[in-house]
Image (tube, rainbow, N blue to C red):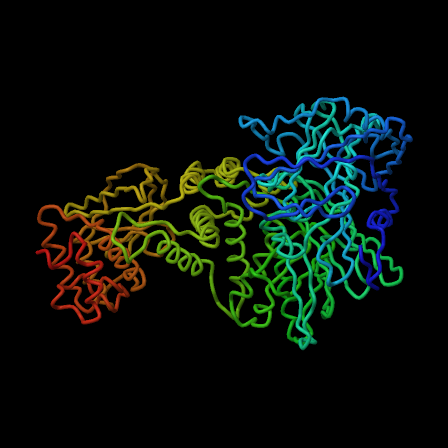
Amino acid sequence: MPNEEGGFVSANATFASLRDDPVPFIVEENETIFLVATEATTSISSSIPSTTGSTLGTEVSEKLITTITHGTTNEAMDKFEGQGTEESNKIEDLSNPPICLLEELRYNKLDCQFASRTEDFNADWLNPSFSLPEVSSLIRPINYDLNITLANKHAPILYGSIRIFLEVINNTSSILLHADRQISDLDMEQITIKNCANGKTICIKSVTRLIDQKVVLLSLSEELSKGTFLLVQIANFETEIRSNPGLFQQIPSKWEKDRAWVLGSFFENVGAKNVFPSVDNHFNRASFHLCLQYPSSLNARGNMPEESKTSSGSVTTSCFTKTPATTTHQYAFILFDNMQILTSNSSSGIEIEVLVGKHLELTECQWIISEVNSGLQKMETLTGVPFPIPKLTVISSALDVDGMSSLGLILVKETWIEYPKYLLTHTILIRQLVHQWVSNVLMLCKGHDNPCFQDGLTTYLEWVINADLAMFNVSAHKRFIEAKQKLLLSYSSEKIPQDVGSSSITRDDCAERSALIFYMLEYNFGSLRNFLHKLVEKFAWGPCTSIENTAKELSEISNSPIAKEIFSSYMGSSSYPLIKAEIFTNGSLVITQESVQGNTELFTLPIELSNDQGETQRLVIGSTRLVTQFPSNFIILDAEQRLFARIIYNVENYRQLKDCYQSPTTCKISRESLKNAFNDLCFAFLVNRLDNSGTNVHAWYSLFENLGNLTSELGLRDCECCMKRQKDSAPKCKWIWRDKCSKLSLAPQKR
């Protein structure tokens, strides 16, 4: 590999020096590379690295599966003995540490040579009926020791070595690790597996790259029983930098003297499988010990504070303290130069470090320190758990996303850092700060209908924390209303009349939907802090917490099974409730639920009723139909907008609401609440949800006519055109009438 001066150094010698571990570099005789395709190769797309470090220029299709096996014709070859090492990171949760962690191991490489040659080649995966097991169904990672080397800023690859301490959780004769196509040189020569109970080397029969499945399959010469502890060591691999979704890079132009050069990991969304072999998912926790070797002109940061830093000539090595057990999506590192550093200590003693470009004045970035310090205090109060590690670094950089969070390391898009007068800047920063707890101390499992369960809690906590920002004066309630209105529009297109429309929910929308649920629960039952304390107390640093367990805790904390039912009904659906309310002259009120977007699930809803005198009554509906008495000239449900639902009324009730809106001095209902009611009327009209049976048709036409110019004042947009006859509507309505209004069951031209 090239060094900073342009020469070459041994990659394996370099890795061995990172922790002073001897890493055997073995080159066997008569190696054979078998390239096996599951179907005819029709396209040319990738290169297969050979076991000797050169690149085989053969290009293969997406379906190519690469198997590398050993064969030798020299049975009199010399015996090779390599030495293992003492594991640098003790695993605290093991009362009887395996031998891997206590003493150096010796193994006989020749034994594995003969085993490889004499065992039948296992090609079960070539059988079309073969089903590849889930990686996490076979093994559980406990600790990673990762070494990464960057030769120079222009290098196209990273060099790496890794030791993975793991436990076998089901009997198996194979080990699967996630490894995407950006990782190469995963040769049998480089891989050693040791049984930690006795120090025995477990022989590998073949190493198979399943490119489409993004895994490497290690076929073993023996079956491993459940509960076996292993040390898997990969002495050398290479990772492509460019076009790697697991990495991001900022390369300044020659004239950008104040712009930083940056190379960092991007694991939060895609995981670590693009950069190093691992068990890469959202629920397996393992500790992580990282060493980076890089040109001395650069600086390095990881999840944790540095435990050692040494320099030799133009090369620097930084090793970082081992992390608590967390997921690979939370591992991180970053290399950079030409950045300014701002440091401070929080009120609880946490070191806060901020890195920004030199084009910014440090005095203009003090707000970051202040806001992070305040956020740390509030999260500690809300969860009852202090920040879990001694240091937090916030970095401003060019990203394709607004922000990214890893344990101890937050990245924010530099364009937002430059404009702190925007609420979105603070939203992004605090949301990443909340993830320090919610993605690490406490993990929430993804649900089938609500994959953003964890992001939803993060979003709601950001609303709560940022509500105290005096410069914006944005309450959590206001954020709830904004998110609700935006999300309801994304659920249903108001430009195409259909049965509520098609869903086009983005990730942010998905997170905000879950945040709406947490807001409703806090408003109706309170005790958010007690709820979070209980969750953290029971599930901190453990596996992800399921929706079912969360609902159970909600019920216990609120001392009400209704809280659980509300939470479960919303989390168990990807839709939202549509409520119809009819008030009759005898004071009878009928409330019904209707299906939306084909979903038939019933929601449990906490509803607040308001009458014409402003008096309120609260009730819960959990069925398709509820009948109660509520004498009033008219009613309005959810007047304060604290329910995630659409609500529509009978025609007479809308007429009374219109009269109330036009009498602001005597009306007891706020104008904003009335506008929201008519907004839902517009929705129902445009998607043919209004009752057009019997005499209702003429009653609706009369209402539309009486609304007159109020449609514009009420912000009903397209309804302004469709509620009038085509000949009476404005010229701007010509095409709206043709494309939309003419298809409505209550369009005025049909009378």
Left or right position of 539 against 72: left
Quadrant of the rendering where the C terminus is positioned:
bottom left
At 78% from the left edge and 39% from the top edge, which residue is drawn? 190
Left or right position of 464 against 543: left
Which of the pair 47/393 is nearer the observer?
A: 47
- Which residue is situated farthest in the right direction here? 78
Relative vertical location of residue 658 with respect to residue 443 in this rendering, above or below: below
Quarter-of-image position of residue 348: bottom right
Which of the pair 667/480 is nearer the observer?
A: 480
Q: Position of residue 478 (x, y in %)?
A: 43, 61
Which of the pair 165/705 is nearer the observer?
A: 165
Relative vertical location of residue 297 with respect to residue 185 in this rendering, above or below: below
Quarter-of-image position of residue 487: bottom left
Q: Position of residue 308 (x, y in %)?
A: 84, 54
At 62% from the left edge and 30% from the top edge, which residue is drawn? 137
Quadrant of the rendering where the N terminus is positioned:
bottom right
Q: Position of residue 131 (x, y in %)?
A: 56, 28
Q: Position of residue 268 (x, y in %)?
A: 61, 51
- Number of labels in the image equals 0
